[in-house]
Amino acid sequence: MEAAEIGSWGFGEAPLIIAGPCSAESEEQLLVTARALKATGRVHILRAGLWKPRSRPSSFGGEGYKALEWLRTVKQETGLPVAVEVASPLHAEACMKAGIDVVWLGARTVSNPFSVDEIVAALRGTNQPVLVKNPLGPDLELWQGAIERVHAAGIEKIAAIHRGFTPYEKNRYRNIPKWELAIELRSRIPSLPVLCDPSHMTGRADLVPGMAQKALDLNMAGLMVEVHHDPHNALSDKEQQLDIPSFKKMMERLVFRASTSDDTGFRNRLGEMRDRIDSIDNQIIELVASRMRISREMGEFKCLNDITIFQLERWLEILQTRTSHGVAEELDRVFVGKLIRLIHEESIRCQEKVMEELRERGGCPPADQGGDE
């Protein structure tokens, strides 16, 4: 699929900055916040939630349809385009009638393909710009599927929003970043703009600037940031919303780096380093392939001698010695551990496959289920 570049949407070039309160609480609140954001000169689109899918029924769920008129007033006064989350076909239809410029599908909605299908049916043929947040769980297929459903409706102005994934245990962040999934999504759909929502990702206003810089350093196409003129008295998600001065300070301090350079010296030097990395990567692959050939040979040898694949003492020795070696080479201990475990798991698989093939040919006696070298 091909998605339209951010610059062709009519709101400005990437990185696109979307900012505004978590919820539209009153017309005055929206106007005060929108005026202040407009004055910064750094915001392309104002965001506001009208229908909030809250976990508890007692939580503030948004002002709903009547707030669409507030946003119309904000748009007329400030000139800022406006964006709203939609969770049903009725929401989508009401937003289009009210002249809402951008809609987005939230994490809970994206987690349900039936909901996505229903909303997409209401948007079909409109080419309404649509943002698709990642689902609650780290399910890349579900995220990509929602994007493909939107595109199949004839909508080309599509972008993904990386807002992190719900943790299964206590974590520093409200939602775990898992940047590798956003990077993989971009690899699968190279034309797709991917923005970051550091507010939902962190859950804490003081952590938003650092996460926003991380997103920009990873060449994200923009940011969606929650900003409230008085976060302390906000009716929803007050902990993660920046106040106006904090937002201004963040925007002044963020470093917007170029993804490339026209400087010949820079490009030549970068090319040399990439060539060296390519050479090393090829050597790594060849060495790993050699290791797996030995693992298959080892699996056959163990099978013929009726020895189990896994020996705990040997595995613990491998883990300890390779990790120590990696740390001595100034590699991160956690990274080395993950790398060795991946190689080890593949080695186990190779040995199991060899044993299975030998047993099928009658060349190896039945063996206990095992696991390693």
Image (cartoon, rainbow, N blue to C red):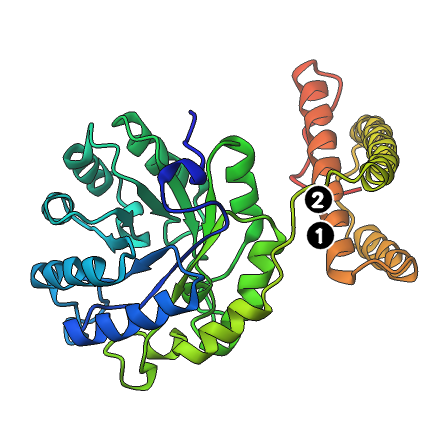
- For the residues labelled 2 and 1, the Cα–Cα distance comes to 6 Å
Q: Is residue 192 left or right of residue 327?
A: left
Q: Is residue 9 left or right of residue 87?
A: right
Q: Within 10 Å of the Cα at label 1, are there few (<14), some (14-19), or many (20+) other Cα atoms?
A: few
**Residue 171 can be seen in this image:** no
The residue beneath circle 1 is 338
Q: Position of residue 55 (x, y in %)?
A: 24, 67
- Residue 252 sits above or below residue 267 on the image: below
Residue at the (41%, 31%) spot, across then down: 3
Q: Amino acid at mark 1?
A: Lys
Give the secondary structure at mark 1.
Answer: helix
Residue at the (46%, 36%) spot, across then down: 192
- Relative depth, front residue between 237 and 371: 237
Residue at the (40%, 42%) spot, across then down: 159
Name, please, the residue furthest toward the top: 361
Q: Position of residue 302 (x, y in %)?
A: 82, 32
The residue beneath circle 2 is 342
Q: Is residue 130 left or right of residue 90?
A: right
The image quadrant where one finds the C terminus is: top right
> Is the C-beta separation of discs 2 and 1 under 8 Å?
yes
Task: Tell me the tag on residue 100.
Answer: none
> In which quadrant of the rendered view does residue 214 lie?
bottom right
- Relative depth, front residue between 163 and 111: 163
> In which quadrant of the rendered view does residue 321 lie?
bottom right
